[in-house]
Image (spheres, grey):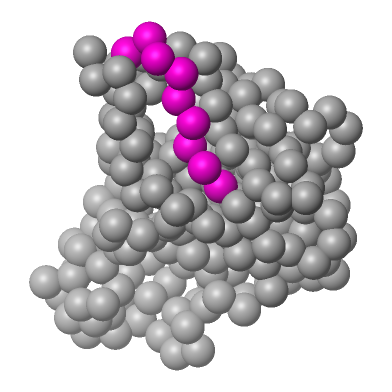
Amino acid sequence: AQSVAQPEDQVNVAEGNPLTVKCTYSVSGNPYLFWYVQYPNRGLQFLLKYITGDNLVKGSYGFEAEFNKSQTSFHLKKPSALVSDSALYFCAVRAFSSGSARQLTFGSGTQLTVLP
Amino acid sequence: NAGVMQNPRHLVRRRGQEARLRCSPMKGHSHVYWYRQLPEEGLKFMVYLQKENIIDESGMPKERFSAEFPKEGPSILRIQQVVRGDSAAYFCASSPQRDSNQPQHFGDGTRLSIL
């Protein structure tokens, strides 16, 4: 079984400061890892993914994430936060090769608030 | 709009009625996934479909819930005899290939409220 943990329900950061949203995962085999963002009353928007290759992945809107296999983590980062980054962020995982299981397993989400 | 389209955006039903949620995948996508999001929770997988086939329904409740993705037309998630606990946001996602590493693209969801 695969699982995702987002240990922080809420992250507050001042505008212009760096932000980190944490994610750890558990999966059999190699993972596909994703970050999505959700604005109120909207669906999830894809930010970035890790499949293979460089451990540092760059995505949309200046976000990046670092894959750490030994710590089974995939933390989302941004060097300088904007007020408009305030939203709900979800980390998700699926196994690289998992038979018929193609679904994503999501974390419980982290509400990011960027303070002006 | 080339994105995943879900309708209705909001649906209100009384206990015991039926709810039908529709999802049209992105153009060129042949795989559809349904997820449910309860308040203050993440998304939980329900079912994964290909055209005319259910590939994985391990997340579907055993009773009252069904899904289809016909050869023509949108995917339908059907909930019979709804109960208050069915109140949630239901999201559809699509992807282009079964074994692709492409991300799933999500619609804006249907918010189901049971009176």
Q: Position of residue A76 (x, y in %)?
A: 56, 33
Range of magenta residues:
A15-23
Q: Is residue B96 left or right of residue A15?
A: right
Q: Nearer the viewer, residue A92 or B71?
A: A92
Q: Indicate whether residue B22 is drawn in magenta.
A: no
Q: Residue at x 20, y 63 (%)?
A: B113
Q: Main secondary structure of the magenta part?
A: loop
Q: Position of residue B105 (x, y in %)?
A: 59, 40
Q: Which residue is most to the left?
A: B115
Decide: is B101 above or below A61. below
Decide: is A1 above or below A25. below
Quarter of the view holding residue B33: bottom right
Q: Position of residue A91 (x, y in %)?
A: 55, 46
Q: Residue at x 22, y 13 (%)?
A: A116
Figure disc tally:
0
Q: Nearer the viewer, residue A70 or B83?
A: A70
Confirm whether residue A51 shows in the render: yes
Q: Residue at x 74, y 42 (%)?
A: A68
Q: Nearer the viewer, residue B109 or B1?
A: B109
